[in-house]
Image: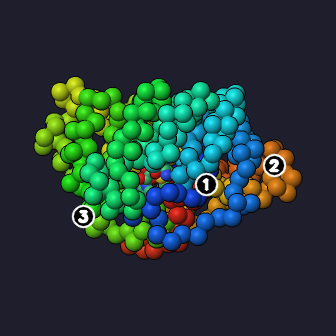
């Protein structure tokens, strides 16, 4: 089955938020005091697996587990194992802050069939890290997690670094130098206006161009070809052969035209854009006993009508829309 939307975009990639809870409070993502969903409203593992299976039937090839912090779900390896046994799945990945990624957990995830991991880290110095994530532990804990993921073969490990102007642009070069020649792919992300609680304003965006310029001054880089059509991160290679970086420029250079992502929230709502204000409640359908064919018809009808291109339309007015929080919809 091939699902194509109004702008000829195939459904290809499903990002699943498996919990809306997180053990960090990154300033660009969550408020200090959040209201979380009650447990009974969160999809069970069986429900996640069933919906993913259905999406794979509809053409999805790649699944990313995210949140919230996905490692807060203790049974994560069981879910990965279930997903990896679905015929047609080509790639299962995970985005995590790394805090709970012990050697044992990393190995379990690898053995269960996880292919790749992305760890979020926004600075190398403890002071900036604390200012962003509001936690007391040290950056070394996250660096250990990155090393652990690499050592068990969850590679290539990628690092997500969100750059917020006035907060951590001074950390760009130290991060680039640290991961240069390591085989680990550092990706810089422009601060985005996801959700409604992070007080986003354009003035706080450190642009992709500024990021590239900052690195290029000391570590010369040149554009590299995309790995595949529609790759979100623009690739840059170090001229000295020290590997590559990625820059995700959703704000200053939107890539809506190639967006093939569907998103499943922690409570089972389908969203067809990261900046959406409304989703379709698939959990209700399955808990009311609807069969997979019916769920597929509902999803198919939504995808065929899809016209989302928020980042291309971003304006001072769209910024005020009541968008769904990143932790809930899945980053
Ligand atoms: N807890 C996990 C983590 O920290 O990686 C997964 C969820 S988190 C929401 C997923 C990614 O979204 C992280 O890399 C985070 O830095 C990024 N993110 C969150 N809010 C963002 C924002 N306003 N702009 C850009 N990226 C953001």
| Front-most of residues 325 and 12 | 325
Residue where numbered disc 1 is placed: 19
Q: How far apart are the two marked residues, 1 and 2, measured between alpha carbons?
A: 25 Å
Residue pictured at 50% horizontal, 38% vertical: 102
Q: How far apart are the two marked residues, 1 and 3, measured between alpha carbons?
A: 30 Å
| Front-most of residues 178 and 127 | 127
Residue 166 marker: 3
The percent coordinates of residue 317 (x first, y second) are: 43, 74
Q: Is mark 2 within 8 Å of ligand 1?
A: no
Residue pictured at 18% horizontal, 48% vertical: 214
Q: What element carries label 2?
A: helix
Given contact means CB atoms under 8 Å apart, are the residues at marks 1 and 3 in contact? no
Question: Which mark is in front, 1 or 2?
Answer: 1
The percent coordinates of residue 292 (x first, y second) are: 80, 44
> Relative to 7, does residue 156 appear above or below in the rendering?
above
Residue 294 marker: 2
Residue 323 marker: none
Q: Is mark 3 on a helix, strand or loop?
A: loop
> Relative to 10, does residue 132 appear above or below in the rendering?
below
Quadrant of the rendered image containing residue 198: bottom left
The percent coordinates of residue 207 (x first, y second) are: 27, 55
The percent coordinates of residue 115 (x first, y second) are: 53, 30
Which residue is most to the right? Answer: 289
Mark toward the start of the polypeptide (1 vs 2): 1
Mark toward the start of the polypeptide (3 vs 2): 3
Residue pictured at 28% horizontal, 36% vertical: 179
Q: In this view, does 252 lie to the left or right of 113?
A: left
């Amino acid at each position: 089955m091939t699902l194509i939307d109004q702008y000829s975009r195939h459904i290809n990639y499903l990002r699943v938020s498996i919990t809306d809870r997180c053990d960090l409070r990154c300033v660009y993502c969550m408020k200090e005091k959040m209201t979380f969903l009650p447990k009974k409203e969160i999809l069970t593992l069986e429900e996640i697996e069933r919906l993913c299976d259905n999406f794979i039937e509809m053409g999805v090839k790649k699944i990313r587990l995210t949140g919230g912090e996905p490692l807060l779900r203790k049974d994560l390896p069981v879910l990965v194992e279930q997903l990896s046994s679905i015929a047609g799945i080509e790639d299962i990945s995970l985005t995590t802050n790394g805090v709970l990624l012990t050697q044992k957990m990393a190995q379990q995830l690898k053995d269960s069939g996880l292919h790749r991991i992305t760890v979020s880290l926004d600075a190398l110095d403890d002071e900036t890290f604390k200012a962003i994530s509001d936690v007391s532990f040290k950056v070394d804990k996250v660096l250990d997690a990155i090393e652990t993921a690499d050592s068990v073969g969850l590679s290539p490990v990628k690092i997500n670094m969100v750059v917020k102007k006035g907060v951590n642009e001074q950390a760009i070069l130290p991060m680039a130098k640290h991961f240069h020649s390591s085989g680990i792919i550092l990706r810089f992300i422009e601060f985005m206006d996801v959700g409604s609680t992070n007080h986003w304003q354009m003035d706080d965006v450190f642009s992709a161009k500024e990021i590239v310029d900052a690195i290029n001054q000391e570590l010369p880089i040149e554009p590299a070809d995309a790995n595949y059509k529609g790759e979100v991160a623009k690739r840059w290679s170090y001229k000295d052969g020290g590997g590559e970086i990625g820059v995700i420029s959703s704000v200053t250079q939107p890539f809506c035209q190639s967006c093939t992502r569907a998103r499943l929230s922690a409570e089972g709502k389908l969203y067809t854009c990261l900046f959406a204000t409304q989703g379709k409640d698939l959990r209700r359908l399955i808990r009311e006993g609807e069969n997979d064919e019916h769920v597929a018809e509902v999803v198919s009808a939504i995808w065929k009508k899809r016209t989302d291109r928020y980042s291309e339309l971003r304006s001072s007015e769209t910024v005020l829309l009541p968008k769904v929080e990143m932790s809930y919809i899945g980053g």
